[in-house]
Image (tube, rainbow, N blue to C red):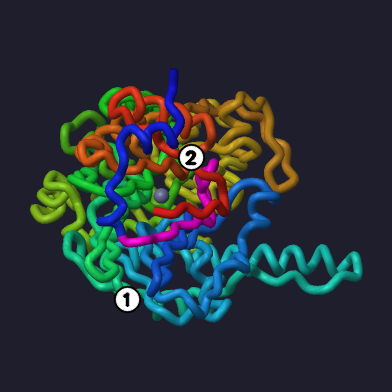
Amino acid sequence: MSKSPQQVDLQAPRDIRHLAPVKVTLLGAAGEVTGSCYLVETFSARILIDCGMFQGSRKIERLNHIPRLLAVQDIDAVVLTHAHLDHSGRLPLLVKSGYRGPIFATDGTIDIAKLILEDAAKIQCQDAEHETRIRKRAGLSKAEPLFTPRDVERVCAQMRSIQYDSWHDVADGITVKLVEAGHILGSSSVLLRVTDKDLSQTIVFSGDLGAWGSPIVRDPACIDTADTVFIESTYGDRDHRPLDETVAEFEELITTAVERKGKILIPTFAVGRTQQILYHLAAMFREHKVKRFPIYLDSPMAIAATQLYTKHQELMDEEAVSLHSSGQLKSDLTSVIPCPTADQSRALNTVTGPCIILAGAGMCNAGRILHHLRHNLSKPETVVMIVGYQTRGSFGRFLVDGATSAKIFGETVPVRAKICTLGGFSAHAGQTDLLRWLSPMAKSNPRVIITHGEEHQRHQLAYKIRELYDINAEMPKMFETLSL
Ligand SMILES: [Zn+2]
């Protein structure tokens, strides 16, 4: 029979005399995966860990504001685990509401967050303009973007870089240490030490964790001990397909498509996935598995993100560092052609295969990939390679689900291209790696709180944690406050 959290407290009483009093409120990513934001309050300070955007349905996106309970003028600091929008996307709203304090993050996160937030602001403004045109016809007032490039500039000006693996004072009585999370370049888990007189406690926030053995990024760092652990559970219920099997399938698909001289369209997630795809292609050329052919990088954001990866070689794993510093990767990838302008993108309509076009958006909902799909979906030699998650309702999902024709920019196009999905590329740890990350800390019998996952994923991870470590993990609701 399973034990309730209360029973566990009775069986293994925690010595609260050694713990400084702390309250943590979940302002997002509780029972779902977006909107990450924790408010940490002590007697003398209030800080936020992440300030992410809610993404998905219109209903969930309505939560994209700064909650009233958050008195912005009383926030002393923000600590950002990594740059993804679901962790950073409400920062512009925070500064818009008057926050003028520091936003601490690693160098890599600061650079990538700037790129991601600038892009998001541009999309917000475009969407607002579009909405305004519709509203105008109905005699309604102008639509306002959630935030603008100006708000993002403010956020960037408030960013403060901190090094991995050393303690930094961020507010009165609060020090933090960022350690590698292995998720994207610059990503970190946060160790937060709260000291109040002679009492102290360590709270760990996993951030988004990557998988062990992922290419380019380093493996997640192991943390030895904690009083409380907040752990993500995006894939708390399952493991991914092994990476080597996915890479083998990727190579086979590429080889076949090249033989058929088709265009290979890869909808791109600009940060992380693009660089990983280029990395695997480089290996194929180096090992002569396929003859070199043109790879068009048709996304200004992916081009910029790839440059940032090259800039931050100090954050890469050993293999990637060696390939970069020896110049090997550069010589493997001489056939990569960046296409920053719209004219260069349009010119790709007339090029012949074999070639790869990497273009945004990752779920085919917008962006240059739609033009390439319109031109090439009707050709049987085309391959559309889906390398990232396609949410329900997205155009990418519609193709994956076997659409026979598609309407793009008002034109109906028959789908004769081969649509293939490679499910094993993921920037997130699967269940086994989440448990592996928790394992050293479990020995110190911490309070474990599962967040950043849907209910099923959270429950499955909780079940495993109880089975392996005899710890009853908690699954708080959104806006719940926990006393630690
Ligand atoms: Zn992330």
Image x and y of residue 34, in percent = 52, 49
Image x and y of residue 38, in percent = 46, 58
Q: Residue at x 47, y 49 (%)?
A: 359
Q: Amino acid at mark 1?
A: Asp
Q: Is residue 265 visible in this depiction of the protein? A: no
Q: Which residues are magenta?
A: 20-34
Question: As drawn, which residue projects farthest toward the right?
Answer: 139
C-alpha separation, residue under disc 2 versus residue under disc 1: 29 Å
Q: Residue at x 46, y 82 (%)?
A: 100
Q: With respect to residue 424, does 177 lie above or below?
A: below
Location of mark 2 (residue) = 475
* Quadrant (top left/top right/bottom left/bottom right) for the N terminus: top left
- Residue 172 got which mark? 1
Mark 1 secondary-structure assignment: loop
Asked whether residue 453 is drawn in magenta, I would say no
Q: Do the residues under discs 2 and 1 have CB atoms within 8 angstroms?
A: no
Binning the other alpha carbons within 10 Å of mark 2 as few (below 14), some (14 to 19) or many (20 upward) gives some
Asked whether residue 22 is drawn in magenta, I would say yes
Image x and y of residue 418, in percent = 51, 26
Q: Earlier in the sequence, mark 2 or mark 1?
A: 1
Q: With respect to residue 184, does 395 lie above or below?
A: above
| Left or right, 139 with reference to 302 | right
